[in-house]
Amino acid sequence: PGEIGGADFVLSRLTDCTVYLCDTAAALRIDNLVRTRVFAAPLKGGSVLLEGATDCVFSLAAQQMRIHSAVGCDLYIHVRSNPIIEHSSACRFAPYIFRPPNLEALLQAAGLQGHNAWEKIEDFNWLRAQKSPNWSVLPEAER
Protein backbone atom coordinates (compact mmCIF):
# COMPACT_ATOMS: atom_id res chain seq x y z
CA PRO A 1 0.00 0.00 0.00
CA GLY A 2 1.10 3.55 -0.72
CA GLU A 3 2.70 2.85 -4.11
CA ILE A 4 -0.20 4.05 -6.32
CA GLY A 5 -0.84 7.06 -4.11
CA GLY A 6 -4.32 7.85 -5.42
CA ALA A 7 -3.21 8.22 -9.06
CA ASP A 8 -5.01 6.72 -12.07
CA PHE A 9 -3.95 3.15 -12.86
CA VAL A 10 -3.96 1.14 -16.10
CA LEU A 11 -3.98 -2.62 -16.65
CA SER A 12 -3.44 -3.49 -20.30
CA ARG A 13 -2.79 -6.56 -22.47
CA LEU A 14 -2.52 -9.17 -19.71
CA THR A 15 -3.07 -12.90 -20.26
CA ASP A 16 -3.23 -15.62 -17.58
CA CYS A 17 -2.31 -13.20 -14.75
CA THR A 18 -3.54 -12.52 -11.22
CA VAL A 19 -3.37 -8.88 -10.11
CA TYR A 20 -3.88 -7.52 -6.59
CA LEU A 21 -4.18 -3.72 -6.25
CA CYS A 22 -4.11 -3.16 -2.51
CA ASP A 23 -3.62 0.60 -2.70
CA THR A 24 -6.23 3.24 -3.53
CA ALA A 25 -6.28 4.57 -7.08
CA ALA A 26 -8.36 7.48 -8.37
CA ALA A 27 -9.52 5.64 -11.50
CA LEU A 28 -8.85 2.28 -13.10
CA ARG A 29 -8.67 1.60 -16.83
CA ILE A 30 -8.61 -2.02 -17.91
CA ASP A 31 -8.16 -3.09 -21.51
CA ASN A 32 -7.52 -6.28 -23.43
CA LEU A 33 -7.30 -8.87 -20.65
CA VAL A 34 -7.63 -12.62 -21.21
CA ARG A 35 -8.08 -15.26 -18.47
CA THR A 36 -6.88 -12.74 -15.87
CA ARG A 37 -8.05 -12.18 -12.31
CA VAL A 38 -8.07 -8.63 -10.90
CA PHE A 39 -8.70 -7.84 -7.24
CA ALA A 40 -8.67 -4.10 -6.52
CA ALA A 41 -9.12 -2.01 -3.39
CA PRO A 42 -11.97 0.55 -3.63
CA LEU A 43 -11.22 3.48 -5.92
CA LYS A 44 -11.24 6.80 -4.14
CA GLY A 45 -14.08 8.71 -5.78
CA GLY A 46 -13.24 7.33 -9.20
CA SER A 47 -14.48 5.09 -11.94
CA VAL A 48 -13.63 1.87 -13.75
CA LEU A 49 -13.49 1.74 -17.52
CA LEU A 50 -13.13 -1.82 -18.76
CA GLU A 51 -12.63 -2.31 -22.50
CA GLY A 52 -12.03 -5.80 -23.80
CA ALA A 53 -11.90 -8.78 -21.44
CA THR A 54 -12.37 -12.48 -22.11
CA ASP A 55 -12.86 -15.19 -19.45
CA CYS A 56 -11.70 -12.92 -16.62
CA VAL A 57 -12.65 -12.45 -12.96
CA PHE A 58 -12.84 -8.97 -11.47
CA SER A 59 -13.44 -7.75 -7.91
CA LEU A 60 -13.87 -3.97 -8.18
CA ALA A 61 -15.35 -1.12 -6.11
CA ALA A 62 -15.94 2.35 -7.55
CA GLN A 63 -18.41 5.21 -7.94
CA GLN A 64 -19.20 4.13 -11.51
CA MET A 65 -18.33 1.35 -13.96
CA ARG A 66 -18.47 1.12 -17.74
CA ILE A 67 -17.85 -2.29 -19.23
CA HIS A 68 -17.29 -2.64 -22.99
CA SER A 69 -16.65 -5.81 -24.98
CA ALA A 70 -16.46 -8.24 -22.06
CA VAL A 71 -17.18 -11.90 -22.78
CA GLY A 72 -17.50 -14.71 -20.23
CA CYS A 73 -16.41 -12.59 -17.27
CA ASP A 74 -17.39 -12.80 -13.61
CA LEU A 75 -17.60 -9.37 -11.99
CA TYR A 76 -17.78 -9.02 -8.20
CA ILE A 77 -18.55 -5.36 -7.76
CA HIS A 78 -19.49 -2.61 -5.33
CA VAL A 79 -20.68 0.42 -7.24
CA ARG A 80 -22.63 3.55 -6.34
CA SER A 81 -24.30 4.14 -9.72
CA ASN A 82 -25.82 1.54 -12.02
CA PRO A 83 -23.07 -0.33 -13.90
CA ILE A 84 -23.20 -0.05 -17.68
CA ILE A 85 -22.34 -2.79 -20.16
CA GLU A 86 -22.03 -2.47 -23.92
CA HIS A 87 -21.11 -5.03 -26.59
CA SER A 88 -20.72 -7.67 -23.86
CA SER A 89 -22.07 -11.18 -23.36
CA ALA A 90 -22.10 -14.03 -20.83
CA CYS A 91 -21.13 -11.69 -17.99
CA ARG A 92 -22.10 -12.66 -14.45
CA PHE A 93 -22.34 -10.24 -11.53
CA ALA A 94 -22.14 -10.63 -7.74
CA PRO A 95 -21.29 -8.45 -4.72
CA TYR A 96 -17.66 -7.37 -4.17
CA ILE A 97 -15.51 -10.09 -2.55
CA PHE A 98 -11.98 -8.68 -2.19
CA ARG A 99 -11.06 -8.01 1.44
CA PRO A 100 -7.98 -5.77 1.59
CA PRO A 101 -6.81 -4.58 5.01
CA ASN A 102 -9.04 -1.82 6.42
CA LEU A 103 -11.82 -2.49 3.89
CA GLU A 104 -14.44 -0.50 5.80
CA ALA A 105 -12.15 2.54 6.04
CA LEU A 106 -11.37 2.26 2.31
CA LEU A 107 -15.07 2.05 1.42
CA GLN A 108 -15.78 5.08 3.60
CA ALA A 109 -12.92 7.11 2.08
CA ALA A 110 -14.23 6.21 -1.39
CA GLY A 111 -17.78 7.24 -0.47
CA LEU A 112 -19.01 3.69 -1.04
CA GLN A 113 -20.34 2.64 2.35
CA GLY A 114 -23.89 1.41 2.27
CA HIS A 115 -25.52 1.62 -1.15
CA ASN A 116 -24.37 -0.99 -3.69
CA ALA A 117 -26.00 -1.16 -7.14
CA TRP A 118 -24.12 -4.34 -8.17
CA GLU A 119 -27.27 -6.00 -9.58
CA LYS A 120 -28.72 -2.96 -11.40
CA ILE A 121 -26.89 -3.53 -14.67
CA GLU A 122 -27.83 -1.31 -17.62
CA ASP A 123 -27.12 -2.95 -20.97
CA PHE A 124 -26.93 -0.17 -23.56
CA ASN A 125 -27.30 -2.76 -26.33
CA TRP A 126 -30.55 -4.13 -24.87
CA LEU A 127 -33.23 -1.47 -24.71
CA ARG A 128 -36.24 -3.75 -24.26
CA ALA A 129 -38.33 -4.04 -21.12
CA GLN A 130 -37.24 -7.65 -20.58
CA LYS A 131 -33.95 -8.41 -18.81
CA SER A 132 -30.90 -8.46 -21.04
CA PRO A 133 -29.60 -11.92 -22.04
CA ASN A 134 -26.03 -10.56 -21.94
CA TRP A 135 -25.62 -10.73 -18.18
CA SER A 136 -26.86 -12.69 -15.16
CA VAL A 137 -26.45 -12.86 -11.40
CA LEU A 138 -23.70 -15.26 -10.42
CA PRO A 139 -25.35 -18.07 -8.39
CA GLU A 140 -24.36 -18.01 -4.72
CA ALA A 141 -23.15 -21.63 -4.92
CA GLU A 142 -20.53 -20.57 -7.51
CA ARG A 143 -19.18 -17.49 -5.71
Image (cartoon, helix red, strand yellow):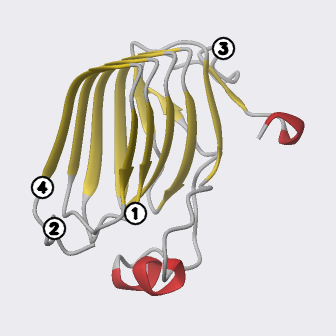
Q: Which residue is mark 1?
A: 41
- Residue 142 as seen in the image, left or right of residue 68: right
Give the distance between the C-alpha atoms of the residues marked 1 and 2, in whole angstroms: 13 Å
Which of 86 and 71 lies nearest the eye of the viewer? 71
Give the distance between the C-alpha atoms of the residues marked 2 and 4, in whole angstroms: 12 Å
Give the residue type that dot 2 points to. Answer: Glu
Q: Tell which tag, 2 or 4, sits nearer the viewer.
A: 2
N-term-proximal mark, 1 vs 4? 4
* The N terminus lies in quadrant: bottom left
Residue shown at 89% from the left, 38% from the top:
141
Rate crowding at label 3 as few (under 14), some (14 to 19) or many (20 or more) other CA atoms within 10 Å: few
Secondary structure of the residue carrying numbered label 1: loop
Cβ–Cβ under 8 Å for marks 1 and 3: no
Secondary structure of the residue carrying numbered label 2: loop
Cβ–Cβ under 8 Å for marks 3 and 2: no
Give the residue type that dot 1 points to. Answer: Ala
Q: Which residue is mark 2?
A: 3
Q: Which residue is mark 4?
A: 8
Relative to 70, is 37 above or below?
below
- Residue 139 as seen in the image, left or right of residue 81: right
Give the distance between the C-alpha atoms of the residues marked 1 and 3, in whole angstroms: 29 Å
Residue shown at 20% from the left, 75% from the top:
2
